[in-house]
């Protein structure tokens, strides 16, 4: 159904059961209640804002003062739409645009991280009589399968039995002494994991749950010999449902975070239900995973592990060097799925490559600010906390996000950067947004959401084939509880149908 008024096209879509989507319901109600008054309000209050978006904000009781919006046609000198463009707000994960674009331009798409192995003893007939040293340089994406290949390469190089310890060196990054529960009291969630120069598999274990005759069976993948589980989970008859299917997982606050307590009532209707959590410390996780996979391959290790800086002699070559995936692949994983730990590893890599070692967060933030300044952007309102946007303190203005996107579109690396952003209705954090609508697949859009914060920033193409850079931020109580997401979808739908010359 199309409703035209004062040159503005309003499109209402029905879903499979003939009901309006909630966001379109807001638009319909807001439009007909506010009517032509919206034009007057836009004109009298100075900054331009699409009538449909303003109607949605009014309906949701979100004041214009809580919203920033900038839409600028690529190649244009001035924005098409601008509201509170220079107000400093919490952007949530759209702040990753600043970190990842700086990293791409600083490191280049083909940049790779290395992990070095040193033998601290004699290797003879497959037996290392001494310790095995491993030094990390910040690989943000060494997953389980990569670590398995890393160990296979070590076997291929002739190591079978290690008669000593693993000596783990993560000194390339300065220590991050932070409380993983400080942000939201969820210390076992992957998004709260701090960066580390020797990060493996995000320190994650996937717990799989099934009801058996002998009780609730818990399978963990990967299996870590130094992780203990307290299984107090019970079964209840019923269909699969409820928050986390009735399972409560707590990683006990032991020094090594090596005790996981699992409680609750799990429905018998759930089969192979799984939850993933971060466990252990970086060094103990590395050791546990090393020992588990190494022994599966037929290898042996007689010692345990130590964390210390390796004594590497001048001009000493490593016994083995493992190379990461190229940065262009890391970039895609970082932005598509809004990975906080990867972004923070990128921030520290920027610091190490442009400032000094050990890399610090402050140096990384300084490097990002200097890069944006060098491109002629106004960073007056920029306050980065850790580069990922997972912070109550981070601040940025919408104009800086748009300026960064415009700059990225002119870069030789434009294809890599834009392709790393989620496609609306297709993949990443935008995979369910605007799905099935005409605007599906027309944008590469980074999302952000925290308590009381919702944001969008990216490149979007209208039905006319015109591309725009946009940034949309709401900082308002309960904006994250669905309503802010719906209003963002209204904005994208409006921009898709916007035709040059139409009223805003």
Image (spheres, rainbow, N blue to C red):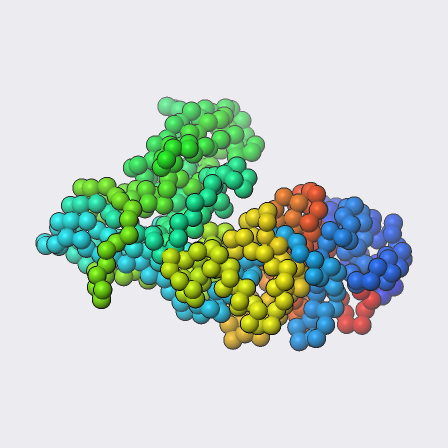
Q: How many marks?
A: 0
Using the image, determine if residue 11 lies above or below residue 499: above
Is 83 positioned to the left or the right of 356 in the image? right
Location of residue 68 (image quadrant): bottom right
For image coordinates 81% across by 49% down, the residue present is: 58
Is 455 positioned to the left or the right of 306 in the image? right
Location of residue 444 (image quadrant): bottom right
Query: Depth check: 467 or 351 in front?
Result: 351
Measuring from the top left, give residue 448's x and y in whole percent. Answer: 60, 52
Q: In which quarter of the image is the C terminus?
A: bottom right
Is 348 positioned to the left or the right of 490 in the image? left
Query: Depth check: 89 or 73 in front?
Result: 89
- Asked whether residue 144 is in view, the answer is yes
| Residue occupying the far left of the picture | 125
Using the image, determine if residue 72 lies above or below residue 197: below
Measuring from the top left, give residue 81's x and y in whole percent. Answer: 75, 65
């Amino acid at each position: 159904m199309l409703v035209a008024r004062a040159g503005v096209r309003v499109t209402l879509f029905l879903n499979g059961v003939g009901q309006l989507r909630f966001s379109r319901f807001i638009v319909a109600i807001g439009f007909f209640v506010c009517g032509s008054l919206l034009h007057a309000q836009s004109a009298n209050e100075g900054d331009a804002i699409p009538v449909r978006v303003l109607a949605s904000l009014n309906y949701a009781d979100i004041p214009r003062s809580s919203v920033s919006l900038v839409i600028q046609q690529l190649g244009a000198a001035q924005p098409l739409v601008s509201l509170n463009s220079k107000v400093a707000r919490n952007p949530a994960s759209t702040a990753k645009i600043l970190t990842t674009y700086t990293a791409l331009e600083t490191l280049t798409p083909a940049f790779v991280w290395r992990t070095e192995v040193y033998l601290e003893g004699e290797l003879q007939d497959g037996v290392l009589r001494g310790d095995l040293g491993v030094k990390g340089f910040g690989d943000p994406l060494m997953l389980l399968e990569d670590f398995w290949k890393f160990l296979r390469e070590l076997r291929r190089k002739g190591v079978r039995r290690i008669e000593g310890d693993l000596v783990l060196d993560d000194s390339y990054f300065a220590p991050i002494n932070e409380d993983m529960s400080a942000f939201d009291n969820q210390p076992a969630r992957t998004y709260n994991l701090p960066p580390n120069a020797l990060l493996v598999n995000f320190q994650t274990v996937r717990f799989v749950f099934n009801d058996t005759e002998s009780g609730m069976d818990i399978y963990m993948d990967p299996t870590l010999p130094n992780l203990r589980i307290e299984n107090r989970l019970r079964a209840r008859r019923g269909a699969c449902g409820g928050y986390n299917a009735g399972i409560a997982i707590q990683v006990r606050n032991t020094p090594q975070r090596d005790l996981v307590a699992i409680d609750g009532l799990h429905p018998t209707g759930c089969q192979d239900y799984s939850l993933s959590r971060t466990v252990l410390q970086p060094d103990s996780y590395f050791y546990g995973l090393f020992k588990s996979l190494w022994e599966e391959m037929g290898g042996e290790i007689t010692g345990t592990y130590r964390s210390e800086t390796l004594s590497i002699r001048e001009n000493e070559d490593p016994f083995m060097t493992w190379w990461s995936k190229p940065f262009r692949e890391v970039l895609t994983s970082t932005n598509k799925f809004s990975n906080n730990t990867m972004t923070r590893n990128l921030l520290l890599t920027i610091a190490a490559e442009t400032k000094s070692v050990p890399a610090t967060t402050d140096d990384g933030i300084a490097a990002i600010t200097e890069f944006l300044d060098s491109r002629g952007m106004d960073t007056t309102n920029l306050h980065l906390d850790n580069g990922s946007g997972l912070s109550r303190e981070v601040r940025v203005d919408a104009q800086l996000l748009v300026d960064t996107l415009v700059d990225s579109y002119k870069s030789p690396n434009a294809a890599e950067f834009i392709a790393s952003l989620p496609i609306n209705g297709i993949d990443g954090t935008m995979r369910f947004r605007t799905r099935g609508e005409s605007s599906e697949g027309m944008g590469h859009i980074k999302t952000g959401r925290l308590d009381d914060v919702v944001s969008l920033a990216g490149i979007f193409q209208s039905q006319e084939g015109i591309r725009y850079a946009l940034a949309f931020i709401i900082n308002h109580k309960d904006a994250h509880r669905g309503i802010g997401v719906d209003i963002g979808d209204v904005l994208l739908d409006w921009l898709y149908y916007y035709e040059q010359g139409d009223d805003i």
